[in-house]
Amino acid sequence: MTTLLEVSGVSVTFDGFRAINNLSIQVAEPELRAVIGPNGAGKTTFMDIVTGKTRPDEGRVVWGEKNISLLGMSESAIARAGIGRKFQKPTVFEEQTVRENLRLALKNKRGPLDVLLYRRSAEGAARIEELASEIGLADDLPRRAGDLSHGQKQWLEIGMLLAQDPRLLLVDEPAAGMTPTEREHTTDILKRAAQTRAVVVIEHDMEFVRRLGCKVTVLHEGSVLAEGSLDHVTQNKEVIDVYLGR
Ligand code: ADP
């Protein structure tokens, strides 16, 4: 495991309010990580910083073996560098089939024309089948995406992100609004995705985090309050106090 993303000493101030305060987080490759913390802890802003949506006032955000600074890079350049992000609400092309959605998302490392050819190639078709089975939608490829359940749309969107082959996938509350069975399937998808890449998940549901069985980072007031296994962090007195609102 090597460090893929290193956020160090980062701070963000919104109208005089320090939303992120000297935050340092390292993510390895591969790794599955859960980021938890009460509302307003800075979880979303952390992801906004990594994806280039929010510029920190100070600190470093360094990426990959060449230690490239992500600060100053545009959101699209950061996405091209290999960072994918899934927001809470699924965004799929409702009128298209599952297969078309995956096909449109398919990317490879070659140039733009090659990508178009790849999408229509046997290799591309095989990759679509593989992705569909990874997200549990192998039997749903001909279905219209708009007809999928909420959970299935979330999985399809994860599949569309995986189709772009990110090195780091940031996922915001993937299990929100899902049934217990769907949640279980979502943990399987994320665990599997994290075997070959870094996956960072913001999550509120502790049962879901427990099932992920990964290292947990607890944010509070824009800083890391605790880090380690879920059992480790939930025994931390400061974490207990924060969650009980003391
Ligand atoms: P979380 O995702 O952990 O709930 P956020 O990162 O959304 O927390 O927010 C951290 C803090 O920063 C909150 O107090 C929030 O109100 C504030 N904040 C986030 N974005 C902005 C913004 N664009 N302008 C002003 N305040 C913001």
Image (cartoon, helix red, strand yellow):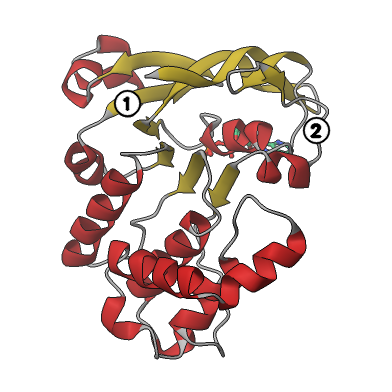
Q: Residue at x 45, y 90 (%)?
A: 144
Quadrant of residue 54 in the image?
top right
Which residue in the protein does label 1 denote? Answer: 216
Alpha carbons under labels 1 and 2: distance apart: 28 Å
Describe residue 61's horizontal placement relative to residue 164 as left or right.
right
Which residue in the protein does label 2 denote? Answer: 73
Describe residue 206's horizontal placement relative to residue 39 as left or right.
left
Q: Residue furthest front?
A: 122
Q: Residue at x 19, y 57 (%)?
A: 184
Q: Amino acid at mark 2?
A: Met
Q: Judging from the image, what secondary structure is the residue with disc 2 in?
A: loop
Q: Is residue 49 above or below residue 92?
A: above
Q: Quadrant of ligand 1?
A: top right
Quarter in which the N terminus is drawn: top left
Residue 81 visible to the viewer: yes
Residue 238 image point, x, y percent: 32, 12
Residue 4 image point, x, y percent: 51, 23
Q: Which mark is residue 46?
A: none
Assess disc 2: are there few (<14), some (14-19) or many (≥20) residues with their C-alpha within 10 Å of its C-alpha. some
Describe residue 101's horizontal placement relative to residue 75 as left or right.
left
Describe residue 115's horizontal placement relative to residue 229 as left or right.
right
Quadrant of residue 42 in the image?
top right
Q: Judging from the image, what secondary structure is the residue with disc 1 in?
A: strand
Residue 26 image point, x, y percent: 48, 17
Q: Is mark 2 within 8 Å of ligand 1?
A: no
Q: Residue at x 67, y 53 (%)?
A: 110
